[in-house]
Amino acid sequence: MEKEKILIVDDEDRIREMIKEYISAEGYEIHEAADGVEALNLFKKYTYSLIVLDIMLPQIDGWSVCREIRKTSLIPIIMLTARGEEYDKLFGFELGVDDYMVKPFSPKELLARIKAIIRRSTLRKNDPSQEDRITLEGLDIEFNSRNVYVDGKQMALTPKEYELLVFFLQNPNQVFSRGQLLNAVWGYEFTGDDRTVDTHIKMLRESLGQYRKWIVTIWGVGYKFEAGGKR
C-alpha cells in the first residue's frame, strides 16, 4: 500500500527536520521544500494528502503559494507562522487554509492535527451515504462538487466554511459549544484560542447572505443551525 505523502514547506532546515523526524515515524512519506517555487513544483508533480506551509518563504511567500494551490485543489493546508495576530489568521482562512499553528509549536500537537485533518478528508471522500444535493429555500449545496449557491449565485466558501455548513446541515437545531465545533470540524481536541470558531462563523454568515439568520448565536453557550424546510 502506497504511503500518504505530506509536503513540508519551510526555509528553516531545523524546522523541516523536526517535523519530518516526528511525523515520518507515523508512516507518512515526507517531501520537503525550502521556498515557494520549489513547493509549487512539487505540488504539480506529486499527489499529497496534506501540506504544512510556512508564511515567510524566499521567492514566493506562503500566502501566494496557498492562493495558487487553491486555484486547482482543496488539499488540506496547515499554515505555520511566527506571528499570531488575528488579521493573519483571518487572511489565511479566507485564502482557504484549514488550520494555523504559531511558532514555536509542539510537534506532537502538529501531528495530532495532521492525522485528524487527513482522517476527516478521507472519510468525506469515501462516504457512500452522502447525499448529492440539499436545497433549503434559496440555499443549494452540491456535495460531490462542494459547490454552494445562494439564490442561484455560486459562493466561494473556504474549506472550513464549507465543512462548518455541512456539519450544521447534518445536525440541525442542536446547540454546540465552540469546543464541540472545533472538535467536530477541525477534528482534534483544541487547547488554544477558540475564537477561531467565531471567525469562521462570521465568514460563513457573510457568505450565506440573507440566510445568515439560520446560524443562531446562543449567548454564553455557542451556536445552532435553524433553517427552512429541506427538499
Image (cartoon, grey):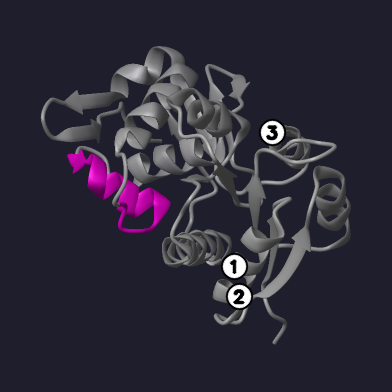
Tell me the distance, in whole angstroms, between the alpha carbons under discs 3 and 1. Answer: 23 Å
Tell me the distance, in whole angstroms, between the alpha carbons under discs 1 and 2. Answer: 5 Å
Amino acid at the residue labelled 3:
Trp
Res 175 quadrant in image: top left
Q: Which residue was labeled with disc 3?
A: 63
Which mark is first along the chain, 2 or 3? 2
Q: Which mark is residue 18?
A: 1
Amino acid at the residue labelled 2:
Glu
Amino acid at the residue labelled 1:
Met
Label 2 packing within 10 angstroms: few (<14), some (14-19), many (20+): few
Instruction: Measuring from the top left, give residue 59's x and y in whole percent.
Output: 85, 37
Instruction: Measuring from the top left, give residue 119's x and y in whole percent.
Output: 49, 66
Q: Which mark is residue 21?
A: 2
User: Does the magenta-highlighted stretch encompass residue 178?
Assistant: yes
Residue furthest bottom as drawn = 1
Say left or right for 55 vs 187. right
